[in-house]
Amino acid sequence: MKIEKTLHSRIDEIDFNNISFGNHCSDHMFCSEFRNGEWKNSIIKPFENINISPKSLVFHYGQAVFEGMKAYKDKNEEVFLFRPEENFKRINRSAKRLEMPSIPESIFMNGLKKLIDIDRDWVPKHYGQSLYIRPFLIAMDRVLSAKPSKDYLFMIISTPVDAYYEYPLKIKIEEKYSRSASGGVGFAKAAGNYASSFYPTRLAREEGFDQILWTDSSTHTWIEELGTMNVFFWLKNKLITPRANENILSGITCKSLLALAKKEGIDIEERDLSVSEIIDGLKKGALKEAFGCGTAVVVNYFQTISYQGVNFSLPDIPDDQRTSILLKKKLLDIQHNFSEDPFGWRLKLKRFL
Ligand SMILES: *Cc1c(COP(=O)(O)O)cnc(C)c1O
């Protein structure tokens, strides 16, 4: 792999006490090209615009998949990745569904580790803060015919992010629009899934809601996800999340919270969860908490759930008694090397250079 280090670091432009999401990319980026059936030209170089033909297939047919992950610092400013092999496996599951080549593990992991090592000063040092990492794969063929590309570009970029403070969400159970359909690409982290959720999300915002609780596309009776997060319900003293299926993206945060909850002795269930069970739980006071989870926000809990025009309030529990906040702290403690890592999730970043 070629490495070209920048001569003009931009790190002094960042106010690490006031980081805004995605505004400042770190000094370097990783690129690797797939051409004639082979991966080549892997390079780490200064972050810059890329030169790309307007004919590139990604613009016209949306062959694009991505990942979202984070690097964290501990008290000694050592840098850690969190379960990166899960992101590696998932981007290749997504790529397969979009008829894209799989990325070799050595390219993904070496690119990732060396890039974050070079940019380690960009990982903010306070608890809760992190360097958000965005690997992505796009179709590069310069043809307008609708067929899978032969050439691809895989890149990794990153941006420092602040700790996210959860605010109580007003949720709408969606009965018209869908995020995914059976046989579709819902389980994949495909760029187009996001594009198609923007319009219904804006409509929900205009009605005064923060997020959409997606239901299955054919009957709108089964709970799937919250916006672009997985979702948990604390119902009848059990922590329940819809079982990952082809309509649901299998989140690494969700998987990790399940493992942590289990270790805490919490009764967990991964199963199909119906809208009527949730509404019934709200009416009978059996639903104590509900929250979304994902890499970007970690957790965010619900204040109200609206269904068919009726607003239901969830109990107003102090933060320090919320399951979501407890689990978030356990997760962040592992991510920041504040606690033991019983599951072997942390990867300490070596110094290569
Ligand atoms: C990325 C994503 C998630 C969360 O996955 P994490 O690995 O926990 O970040 C959940 N749902 C959708 C639709 C996503 O795109």
Image (cartoon, rainbow, N blue to C red):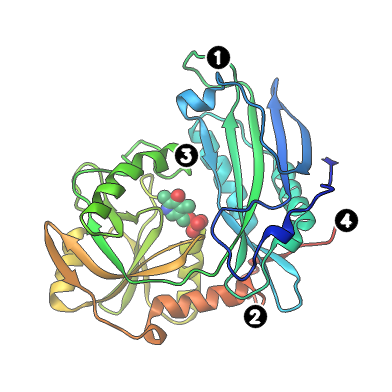
Task: Report the quarter where the N terminus lies.
Answer: top right
Dot 4: element: loop
Q: Residue at x 78, y 39 (%)?
A: 43
Amino acid marked by disc 1: Val
Locate residue 262 relative to residue 154 in the image: left or right.
left
Check whether the beta carbons of the residues at disc 3 and disc 4 lie within 8 A of each other. Answer: no
Residue bearing mark 3: 191
Q: Which of disc 1 and disc 2 is earlier in sequence? A: 1
Give the amino acid type for the residue marked by disc 3 in the picture. Ala
Earlier along the polypeptide chain: callout 3 or callout 4?
A: 3
Which residue, given by chain and number where applicable, does mark 4 sit on?
353
Query: How many residues crowd mark 3 within 10 Å: few (<14), some (14–19), many (20+)?
Result: some
Question: Which residue sits at x=49%, y=68%?
Answer: 164
All told, the count of numbered labels is 4
Separation of disc 1 and disc 4 at Cα?
Answer: 40 Å
Residue 118, above or below 57: below
Which mark identifies residue 308? none
Residue that mark 2 sits on: 338
Question: How far is mark 3 from mark 2, CA to CA?
Answer: 34 Å
Q: Mark 1 near mark 3, Cβ–Cβ under 8 Å?
A: no
> Label 2 crowding class (10 Å Cα cut-off): few <14, some 14-19, many 20+?
some
Q: Is mark 4 within 8 Å of ligand 1?
A: no
Distance from the alpha carbon under mark 2 to that under mark 1: 51 Å
Q: CA distance from mark 2 to mark 4?
A: 26 Å
Judging depth in this view, the residue of 226 and 223 nearest the camera is: 226
Secondary structure of the residue carrying tag 1 is loop
Q: Position of residue 158 (x, y in %)?
A: 64, 52
Amino acid type of disc 4? Leu
Q: Which mark is residue 143?
A: 1
Q: Are marks 3 and 2 in contact (CB under 8 Å)?
A: no
